[in-house]
Amino acid sequence: MIIVSQDKKCILNFENIFGLFTKEKIVYASMSDDLSVAIGSYDTEERTLEVFNDISKCYDQEHIRVLIMPEK
């Protein structure tokens, strides 16, 4: 699955991501032990967790090949 960052400036192959995590109101993708990329920023921590959970749901569905991070 491909993830397109919220600002549309970064395209990531999910298979090359070590992990995803949230910190404050931002979703990050860990590319290595010392490199993490912010892929989306949201108004509330609740919305951040919703988007984070949506990513895992999309990954479980084989027919979804591209996930574009939501604007809000």
Image: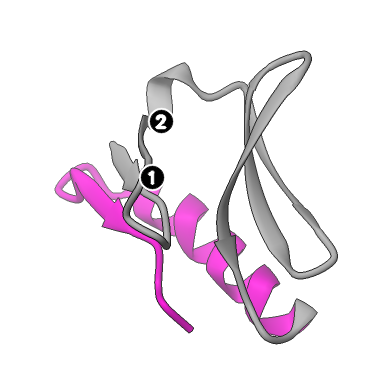
Q: Which residue is mark 2?
A: 14
Between 50 and 68, the one lying in front of the other is 68
Element assignment for label 2: helix
Answer with mark 2 or mark 1, whichever residue precedes in sequence: 2
State whether residue 28 is above or below residue 44.
above
Residue visible at 75% across and 70% down in the picture:
25
Q: Amino acid at mark 2?
A: Phe
Q: Residue at x 35, y 44 (%)?
A: 3
Badge 2 vs badge 1, beta-carbon distance below 8 Å: yes
Q: x, y (%) of residue 62?
A: 22, 42
Position above or below: 23 against 29: below
Task: Say what amino acid the circle numbered 1 marks.
Answer: Tyr
Quadrant of the rendered image containing residue 15: top left
Q: Is residue 44 magenta?
A: no
Mark 1 burial class by Cα count in 10 Å: few <14, some 14-19, many 20+ = some
Q: Is residue 42 left or right of residue 8?
A: right
Magenta stretch in the rendered image: 46-72
- The percent position of residue 47, horizontal first and vertical second, equals 64, 81
Rendering coords of residue 45 (x, y %): 78, 78
Residue at which label 1 appears: 59
Q: Quadrant of residue 44?
A: bottom right
Rounded to the nearest angstrom, the CA distance separating label 2 from label 1 is: 8 Å
Q: Neighbour class for label 2 at 10 Å: few (<14), some, many (≥20)? A: some
In the displayed structure, 54 sits above or below 46; it is: above
